[in-house]
Image: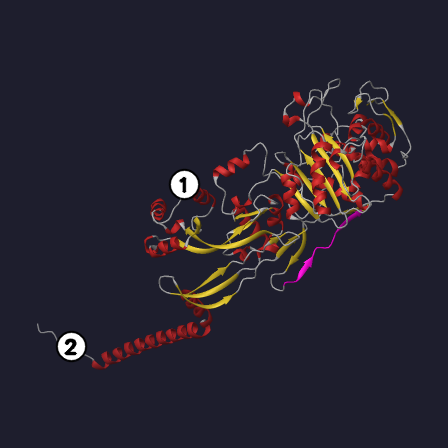
Amino acid sequence: MIRPTQLRNYQLELAGFRKRVIIAAGVVVVMLLLLLARFFYVQVLEYQRYHTLAENNRTTVVPIPPNRGAILDRNGVVLAHNYSAYTLEITPSKTDNLEDTINGLAKLVEITPVQRKRFAKLMAESRNFETLPLRNQLSDEEVAKLAANHYRFPGVEVKARLFRQYPLGETAAHLVGYVGRINDADLHRLDEAGVLDNYRGTDHIGKVGIEQSYETELHGIVGSERVETDVNGHAVRTLSRINPVSGNRLVLNVDSKLQAIVEKAFGSYRGALVAIDPKTGGVLAFVSMPGFDPNLFVNGIDTANWNALNDSPDKPLLNRAFRSAYPEGSTIKPFMALAGLSYGVRKPGDTIFDPGYFSLPNSTHRYRDWKPGGHGTVDMHKSIVQSCDTYYYRLANDLGIDRMHAFLSQFGFGRKTGIDLDGETAGVLPSREWKARRSRQPWYPGETVIAGIGQGYNLVTPLQLAVATAALANGGTVYRPELVQAIIDSRTGQRRVIAPHVVGHIDIKPADLQVVVSAMVDVTRPGGTAVSANVGAPYLIAAKTGTAQVVGIKQGEKYDAKRILASHRDHAVYIAFAPADNPKIAIAVLVENGMHGGSTAAPIARAVMDYYLLGKLPRAEVIKAPAVAPGDVHAD
């Protein structure tokens, strides 16, 4: 059967084709419109953003660390400054094999085992992507060798860096302090303070001393350079630059020559000395012995030196001047005498008989005087000149601990002085409230008795003792001690002077003060406890010696320095100001285990006063080792 042939409908097919063409054209037009819209969005609306991203692909912002401010003494002697040197640095994350890289570098320049250990220590303390120094102070020849072989060592760079230096070494190390590499704790602290951006490119920060407490003044303001780079990231040219602002310079009240004299005078003894201008509170000398070389810490101290300092029984890293507290011993007696006069408990002419001990009513316990057999009849003048313990046992008992605490606290005992250094110890000025808070125990009368001679719970720093002595010298004005005299602006050169800051004023009657000062002057004359150290002084010295017990002595026993360990011998304490009729310097000295204030601590103070007042240099040996004989008495 023949099927009928179907004829094609060209009109229908043509209509379908045209429809498809129209749809395709519409799609193309829509796509073109979308593409044009995207072009408009990117090229016009988002131009600034993509322009910045493109610029960043070919430019790099490099931070320029500021030049850290210098630290000078009162006479312009440099205590801390910077120098420029080349350093060999490695970014561990950019090296394929760190050990092979270091070994390869060691064939070009000397790398000692100590430098390897220090680098390993920095690695342990730092992030893997940080650039760390392997070798500092490269010579020009070494720099040339490393530059010629740079292609062999990815992640290795030679950079010009500023390094901190302390030209006087150990002199004034405890007050100047040192800088060290910024660690995670420093970064956290800077971030919390909102100043982390100002430390971009900076590797070091003040760790202790003035370097730490005046960090914001010394650091400066970071600068930056925008540089064009090639495909390998190498700088091609500088496009713009914002110069860094150097840190401000600090001028101290301290005299570095005086500081060095004191440090030498201590010899092998441990201890501290603080000297203050009683008219301003400016710190003239701030010594803690033994000291250390702060240059060791700048680029990371090596293990051997760290162990030597940290494990030393002499504790050279301890700032004894304001972080160690000691019993003030008999140096408290002039202040106790003033308390007795101020409260009307004693008159200058009132006398007691000293049989060599004091006992509380209804007690058989004897609080012994340092002088066996006693001092006989004693008035206030004699009690200070001969340092009669019995007089002050009785006076303390009559005053009571509450009045003692109220009066002595006015001189700054028992609280921080506010010196411009971090880490100060407050010491202890005991009271009923203090003991109840500390141990929930009542206050006993015997504790008042021994507090009257600066023993028992009493603890004071040499700095506190110097501040109190300065207040005694100037008639009752307590100043905040200041190490920094002025700050010099690095941009303008303007000198911003630190004005004296009065903490308080003690109401002392001139007649009462004269009684005490007159007795302190006689302490340095024949019959006094500090006569030998002050013979021939062409100016008047007002002073008080002291001996601070390190270990207790049982009732009935005698103090015998020869039989006990050297570390258990008494501390020697001494306060003084001069000239007594127009005070220009006030001093507190403590010599650990020095035994007698008059023979050990007083000669150091005399050397300080001779230089400061007369410009006279001390003899080679200021302190002679005191003879220790059996039965040596517990004297001032």
| Front label number (1 vs 2) | 1
- Can residue 398 be seen in this snapshot? yes
Q: Residues within 10 Å of mark 1 (few under 14, many from 20)?
A: few
- Can residue 430 be seen in this snapshot? no
Q: Nearer the viewer, residue 24 or 254?
A: 254
| Range of magenta residues | 493-504
Task: Establish if 230 lies above or below 12.
Answer: above
Residue 373 shown in magenta: no
Q: Nearer the viewer, residue 148 or 191?
A: 148
Q: Nearer the viewer, residue 61 or 175?
A: 175
Colour scheme = secondary structure
| Secondary structure beneath label 2 | loop
| Secondary structure beneath label 1 | helix
Q: Is residue 49 left or right of residue 636?
A: left
Amino acid type at image mark 1: Pro
Looking at the picture, how far across and down is residue 570, in whole percent? 69, 28
| Screen quadrant of the N terminus | bottom left
Task: Establish if 163 lies above or below 463.
Answer: below
Amino acid type at image mark 2: Gln
Looking at the picture, how far across and down is residue 514, in whole percent? 86, 41
Looking at the picture, how far across and down is residue 223, in whole percent? 52, 62
